[in-house]
Amino acid sequence: MHNTFLAQIILPDEFNATFYELIPKQRLLINDLLNKRIVLSYSLDMERKNVWVFIDAMDENAVMDILSTFPIIKYVRVSIHELAFHHTVQVSLPDLIMN
């Protein structure tokens, strides 16, 4: 059975050129994980200090395995929290109107 985890990623105080170069790769990976519904949501705060990632995984080790694939992982600190529940709004397509 899978559980939902919140990974808080603390970004570096200053981004260097190497870190900036990793951002497009990070976005591609996140989009892929979102499409696979491994990552449930991905958020960045306005100060660009924290990223919050909700992940569907078996256990904390599986979460670390996923996070270790992040291109930015060498430059950040991570804390992982298992959640009792995680509710989100269902996103659906609008009703089709057949004229």
Image: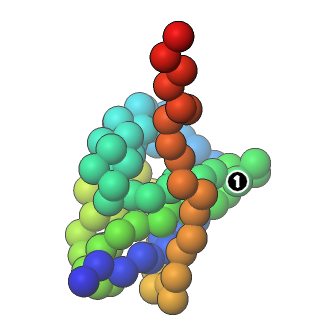
Q: Nearer the viewer, residue 66 or 2?
A: 2
Question: Which residue is rendered at x = 67% and y = 57% of the image?
Answer: 49
Task: Categorize mark 1 by other alpha carbons within 10 Å: few (<14), some (14-19), many (20+).
Answer: few
Q: Quadrant of residue 18?
A: top left
Residue 94 visible, this orientation? yes
Question: Which residue is rendered at x = 57% and y = 63% of the image?
Answer: 88
Q: Nearer the viewer, residue 81 or 21?
A: 81
x then y, percent, for residue 1: 24, 83
Can you say whether 27 is above or below 33 in the image? above
Can you say whether 27 is above or below 41 in the image? above
In this view, which residue lies farthest toward the bottom? 84
Question: Which residue is rendered at x = 55% and y = 32% of the image?
Answer: 94
Query: How many badges with numbers are in the image?
Result: 1
Q: Amino acid at mark 1?
A: Asp
Q: Is residue 63 left or right of residue 46?
A: left
Can you say whether 23 is above or below 87 in the image? above
x then y, percent, for residue 75: 45, 57
What colour scheme governs how the chains and residues are painted in the rendered image of this protein? rainbow
x then y, percent, for residue 35: 33, 44
Residue 71 visible, this orientation? no
x then y, percent, for residue 69: 26, 56
Mark 1 — residue?
Answer: 45
Question: Which residue is rendered at x = 41% and y = 32% of the image?
Answer: 24
In this view, which residue lies farthest toward the right? 46
Secondary structure beneath dot 1 equals loop
Q: Nearer the viewer, residue 57 or 60?
A: 57
Q: Is residue 46 left or right of residue 20?
A: right
